[in-house]
Image: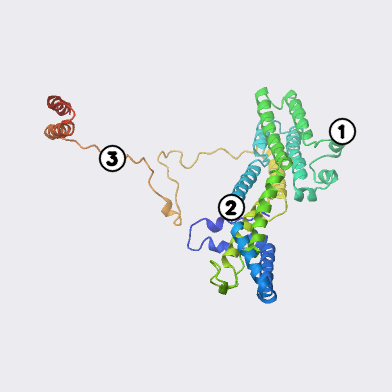
Amino acid sequence: MTVTYSSKVANATFFGFHRLLLRWRGSIYKLLYREFVAFVSLYAALSIVYRLILAENEKRYFEKVSLYCDKYAEQIPVTFVLGFYVTLVVNRWWNQFGNLPWPDRLMFLISSVVHGKDERGRLLRRTLMRYVNLTSLIILRSISRAVHKRFPTMDHVVEAGFMTSDERTIYENLKSPHLKYWVPFIWFGNLAAKTRKEGRIRDGIELQLLMNEMNRYRSRCAILFGYDWVGIPLVYTQVVTLAVYTFFFACLIGRQFLDPTQGYPEHELDLYVPVFTLLQFFFYAGWLKVAEQLINPFGEDDDDFEINWCIDRNLQVSLMAVDEMYMNLPKVQKDIYWNDSDLRPPYTAAAADYCIPSFLGSAADVGLVKRDPAESRSIGCLLKVLVTIKYSKYLQFPLCTFLGWGLCVEI
């Protein structure tokens, strides 16, 4: 679902960003077109009623209401409230992405510290890694609609290979009213301790490294669960939503083009279409829609996180790292720069412009100018005269002369 356009803006080109405005998936047009059509339709309906249906006295009353709405609508602090809210939502969205559980560090450790090329060693490594992925799956299944649709029951988790039937029996027999995402973590710790007793993990330091990394992984899962549990206070979301929609409800009446013959201030023109009001709606309501989309990135919007892809990638990569790649090293050979201390990797013709000399510092090219003694003495005498002239009205002349000659002698 994530919309990626980084390659389109790799270089700053003429109309580079403007080409992005033509995209539909993940665009503001897709998010906002229903609300925009509704706003335009209501505005047009009010304009038709005012121009064609109302009587003259009713028009005068409508004009007074319109001027009143236009005057006091600007007192609603839409920019301040909405800007602070969107900033809070975007920071929260990025922090959630930063806490997605990636098993890479754990798979490096398991592949390095759990030894044994026999079937028992392979079983231990794969089981430990499976518990890691099961921990994140239970958390992601509880906070992501897309993941829950994929794994609606524990039967689907067992069928997908994240859990065995025996493990499921033990898991379901543990009576707890709380989410039991921590159970695979306990299994991981017990199995790691057993592996240490068998000598597959060679010392306590390696076991401690493994447990510390698993605890860090579990903490990321818990942080995601916390974000899902404690959201932005509902009252703040309601205030922002009411502020935006109240402002534009007032604009429906207050931004109407009134009869120019009545001489109302700033109503000398009758353009029918409120261009800048429509742009204001597009920007403010679009700002609010951005917050609505990012406030829960584990949904099914265009820019939500691809959690199902993450699950697939993490399981495949982690099991390969601890199984097929265990002690599967390429032959150690001398590199092509073995006897070359001044090595320079080649550039292709397309990358030739990137071959630049090394930066040695802004003062690297500064040289020292060597002066002869006569020139230095002349400079010192000049300083003597300048000091004498500048401070003669504050100090006694002999003292200034002494200071000047001192500089001359020192230089």
On the rendered image, what quadrant is the N terminus found in? bottom right
Q: Residue at x 70, y 64 (%)?
A: 34
Q: Residue at x 68, y 62 (%)?
A: 35
Query: What whole-number distance in Å separates the C-alpha atoms at marks 2 and 3?
Result: 51 Å
Which label sits in the foreground, 2 or 3? 2
The disc labelled 1 sits on which kind of residue? Answer: Lys
Q: Nearer the viewer, residue 55 or 327?
A: 55
Name the mark on residue 366. Answer: 3
Residues packed near mark 3 inside 10 Å, few (<14), some (14 to 19) or many (20 plus): few
Q: Residue at x 46, y 38 (%)?
A: 338
The quarter of the picture where residue 370 lies is top left
Identify residue for label 1. 175
Residues packed near mark 1 inside 10 Å, few (<14), some (14 to 19) or many (20 plus): few
Q: Nearer the viewer, residue 226 or 53?
A: 53
The disc labelled 2 sits on which kind of residue? Answer: Thr
**Helix, strand or loop status at disc 2:** helix
**Helix, strand or loop status at disc 3:** loop
Which label sits in the foreground, 1 or 3? 1
x and y, in percent, of residue 212 in the image: 67, 29
Q: Nearer the viewer, residue 293 or 357?
A: 293
x and y, in percent, of residue 267 in the image: 55, 69
**Pointers 1 and 2 in contact (CB under 8 A)?**
no
**Among the two numbered marks 2 and 3 on one chain, the one whose residue lies closer to the N terminus:** 2
